[in-house]
Structure formats: structure tokens, C-alpha cells
Image: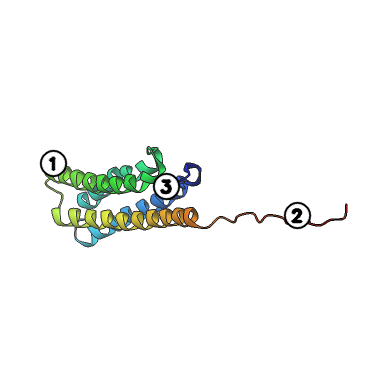
Amino acid sequence: MTDQSAVHIPRTAFGLIMAGASVVAIAAAWFMAVRLGGAGPSATSVVYAMLIGSIATFLPVLLRVGREEYWGVAVLCSGVARSLAIIAVCYMLRENNPAIVARPLFMSAALGAILLLVIETTAAVRILSAIDRRRLSPTPTPTPTPTPTGSNA
């Protein structure tokens, strides 16, 4: 079994990485929507969809998982929830506003979701790999001090 005190997930660092990644992904999605001819309602809608979907990004930071070893599963589930939320919001916005051009909306939303997924996966793998390296590294054992034998006392 693993020592629970040895497992520490740097949630703050992960949260900061994902906050920066969310900003980059939202900007990239907006830029792609504009470049694909979806300026106006399509570009604005993809920003809304990415903002709403990005809420799921921070679930592994905010929620305490039962055991720290399951944190990677929480990251995976939040990534799936984020992608589904982005698609659902895009669909709802498109169905309720005929001025939104579908191709720029969905293509840019896919770009943003994939970009977030790549950054999230990379960050989680690096964090979990560092934890495994610490857990598996040999701990230095104290060397016994030699006791003097044959003293003339």
C-alpha cells in the first residue's frame, strides 16, 4: 500500500495552468471563428460555450476525490464533461439563434476543446509522473554508526 501522506497533488499549480490554458483556448476558438467567417454572433457564442465548458476544467482543483490516487480519473472525467458541455452549449445557442453560422461555431469550439484537452492531459501526466517518481525513489536509509569494540575501559 502507499503512504497517503506521501501523495500530494499540487492543486493550485494545476488550477493556475488550467486557468491560463482556458484563456488561451478561448482566444484561439474566438480567433478561429472569426477567421472562418463567423464574426459577430458565432464568435461570441463560441466564447460563451468555452466559458461555460471551462467550469468543468476546475472540478479536479475544487473537489476532493476520495483517495488522492484517483485524481487522474477526476481529471479525465472533467475533460469529458467539459467537451460535452461545450458541444451542448453550442448546439443550444445555434438552435435558438439562426444568425449563428454553424461551421465556424462548431469548428472553433472543437479547436478550443481539443487544445484544453491536450494541455490538461499534459499537465496531469507531468504531475502524476512526478508523484510516482517521488513515491518510487529509494529513500536513503540511515547507516548504522559503528560502535567501538575492544575498548580498554
Q: Identity of the amino acid at label 1?
A: Asn
Q: Identity of the amino acid at label 3?
A: Gly
Q: Identity of the amino acid at label 2?
A: Thr
* Residue appearing at x 31%, y 43% in the figure: 56
* Residue appearing at x 23%, y 62% in the figure: 35
Label 3 sits on a secondary structure element that is: helix
Q: Residues within 10 Å of mark 2 (few under 14, many from 20)?
A: few
Distance of label 2 from label 3 (alpha carbons)? 52 Å
Q: Which residue is mark 3?
A: 15
Q: Is residue 113 left or right of residue 19?
A: left
Q: Which residue is mark 1?
A: 96
Q: Percent from the top left, x then y, of residue 84?
A: 21, 46
Q: Residues within 10 Å of mark 3 (few under 14, many from 20)?
A: some
Frontmost residue, 116 versus 108: 116
Residue 73 badge: none
Q: Percent from the top left, x then y, of residue 64?
A: 40, 37
* Residue appearing at x 20%, y 43% in the figure: 89
Q: Nearer the viewer, mark 1 or mark 2?
A: 2
Q: Percent from the top left, x then y, of residue 86?
A: 23, 47
Q: Earlier in the sequence, mark 2 or mark 3?
A: 3
Q: Earlier in the sequence, mark 3 or mark 1?
A: 3
Distance of label 1 from label 2 (alpha carbons)? 84 Å
Label 2 sits on a secondary structure element that is: loop
Label 1 sits on a secondary structure element that is: helix
Q: Which residue is mark 2?
A: 147
